[in-house]
Image (spheres, rainbow, N blue to C red):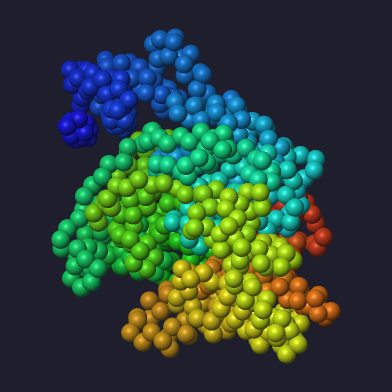
Amino acid sequence: MLENSVEKIIDELVATNLVDMSKSFDIAKTCSELLGKAETEEMGRRIIINVLDNWTKIDTSTREMWTDLIESAGFYPYLEKEKVNLVFKNTAGEIRKGTYGSDYLHECYFHEEQRFLSDLLKKGRNVIASAPTSFGKSLLIQEVVASKKYKNIVIIQPTLALIDETRKKLQRYGDYYKVIVRTSQDFSREKGNIFLFTAERVMEYPQLPQIDFAVVDEFYKLSANRDEERSDVLNNAFNLLLSKHKSKFYLLGPNIDGISAGFAEKYNATFFPTTYTLVDNRVIDKCSEDFGERGKKKTAKEKALFDLLYSLRNEQTIIYCSSPHKVRYLSREFCNYLKDKNTDVASKELNLVDWIKENVNERWGLIECLNHGIGIHDGALQRHLTSSMIRYFNAPKLNYLFCTTTIIEGVNTSAKNVVFFDKYKGYRKAIDYFDYNNIKGRSGRMMIHYVGRIFNFNRPPEKERIIVDIPFFEQTEKISDEVLIQLDEEDVRNKQTEQYNDLQKIPKEERDLFRKNGVLVKGQAAILDCLKKEILEKRELLYWSGLPNYRQLEYVLTLGWKNLLKKTETTRPMTLKRLVKVTNDYKRSQDISQLAASTYRYFKANKKNQSEQALIDDSIREAFDILRHWFHYKVPKWLSVVNSLQKFVCEKCGLSAGDYSFFAKQIENDFVRDDLSILVEYGIPNSAIRKLERAVPLGLGESELLEKIGNKDFLEGSGLSEYEKEVIRENLFV
């Protein structure tokens, strides 16, 4: 088989010390033949990538020949990167290379297929791109922005970490665009605007201007099959941009084989699936019948992992784990392994360590991990911590990064190696072929590593076709109430369904209210019915503003917990009773270390068999998870929804309404001063913002605020720790 022949060539390239003239010609001949046929050109590209990775071994007399092959494969970014070593001897090649330079990005060259997509976007064509991680899809967003072709742009991304990364890249266009990252920011009427939002924020923004161009990153999340909790709001945000704004669009994501039939035709879009990549991922099998999830097999699997990581200590390695708990456990155990070996792999001095000691807990096990070159990355960490972990890892000041699925959603790393250690995501949900490919794609990185390696401790899932359904377009019987209610009447395909008729029976005023709130329709209706019945009886629990007392908070959160959680959502280990208590406690303390301390006491009483270190680490993980998932997301959303519903009922009854908006905003923004809350969105630690509250006068506009904080003398005299200053410089002044 051809594939086996290609693997043999690559193995020989890796194993040999010198590829002589004869062997080089033979490999080049095979490579040229493979590149000449559409069905085999991917294998030809693999050979080229591995030749580049072993360039010093290639006989010098054959390098000109290889340069021509590299050019014929369209690898223009590498021709520019390695222009000292890859020298053209023909003018035609130089001219062709010039045509692949970006029109708007300085000294940037596209590869063959990037250029094709760039030309489509330049012509105003809608594009749906499915390409590997190392394709360079996000670079085309920068190209569109730099072209200044569109005045108002919305970029929808699934995570705040991705938004942070994109914001830093787009800040350089501040003279032409105002970059907006939160719903309280006004858009500019004098210049263009880039709305850099999650889907939720698109729907919550009070009044968008006319949006000319929209980007949906990781567009596979439109499918309810891939993201049950948040696909509804992404569908609604994208549909809003298409139906109301008639926006041009660019959808990007990895490893997609197809989309809803008829979608591309309706919206004059090009669906472009490709496997084109400038990075090769080499698969290394580490599976064994001796490995398992419990007992001796669990111990054997972990020992094999730690031995492997130790052998890779001079390279960057990501280790995929199923959950934040597993991230903490494995990173801690590996740190103990390194300590037992008395190995000298300690990282460079990290300012983060001092910040943790001062603001979280000096006994947190992460400190020792960081001191041994081990970082963590998961959804339970604060944003500035995940951002710092990636920055340290890419520096490289950390050699290892234990992570969950958060790392596969577009965050760029410089990892040469990825270890596929757990075969689940979350609680026993199997990693499928799509997830595995995304994890695999994190190994290697275009322009940094030609070849990445994935070490499989589990059998890869069976290959399957990935078709992204788009519910608002398809409108099958699986469409949710939350998507269907957002559709304009003329866009509803079948008005005879029971589901549609049930929604139409809801009074128009209430239906409009439910649409605006954007969460579970039946849940909102149940809350509304409850409020109508209890508005007088529970008056003292509903009529409040500012900060609620315990009973008022309990009443509102109970309504949210019982009615606004999807059936597929997991709340464990959180309970309603505990949520009320921790929210009330945090309202008083406004301090993450106090939240961690109270969580530690809770765990101490309920987890009798855990070691002291495990209790400390788990309590901090849980506290951060409560902060991120509940305080920054669920609780403020529930407060806002119940707030709007009680105002509606009070108005109908002629009663004065409560106002929960202040508390909702406060808890979402960690109780920081309102005019400084923009810094929360920029990933600045709460501890730093508290210090700035004392040093920054009230009443500054956003631009004045950022300019003042950016003043070197001010920053040095602000009383901020070295880590806090480091994060401010990294996030505000890149």
Query: Given the current orientation, which residue lies at the most extreme left position?
Result: 289
Quadrant placement of the C terminus: top right
Quadrant for residue 160, please give it.
Answer: bottom right
Q: In the rendered view, does 483 fall on the left or right side of 183?
A: left
- x and y percentages locating residue 467 in the rendered image: 41, 46
Which residue sits at x=44%, y=56%? 226
The answer to whether 649 is drawn above or below residue 105 in the figure is below
Quadrant for residue 345, please give it.
Answer: bottom left
Quadrant placement of the N terminus: top left
Quadrant for residue 714, please give it.
Answer: bottom right
Which residue sits at x=64%, y=56%? 486
Asked whether 371 or 496 is in front, the reply is 496
Residue 314 in view here: no
The answer to whether 510 is drawn above or below residue 128 in the figure is below
Query: Given the current orientation, which residue lies at the most extreme top position?
Result: 91
Which residue sits at x=52%, y=23%? 101
- x and y percentages locating residue 649 in the rendered image: 75, 76
Asked whether 340 or 366 is in front, the reply is 366
- x and y percentages locating residue 635 in the rendered image: 61, 72
Which residue sits at x=30%, y=54%? 420
Asked whether 409 or 359 is in front, the reply is 409
- x and y percentages locating residue 174 in the rendered image: 70, 41
Q: In the rendered view, does 560 fall on the left or right side of 711?
A: left
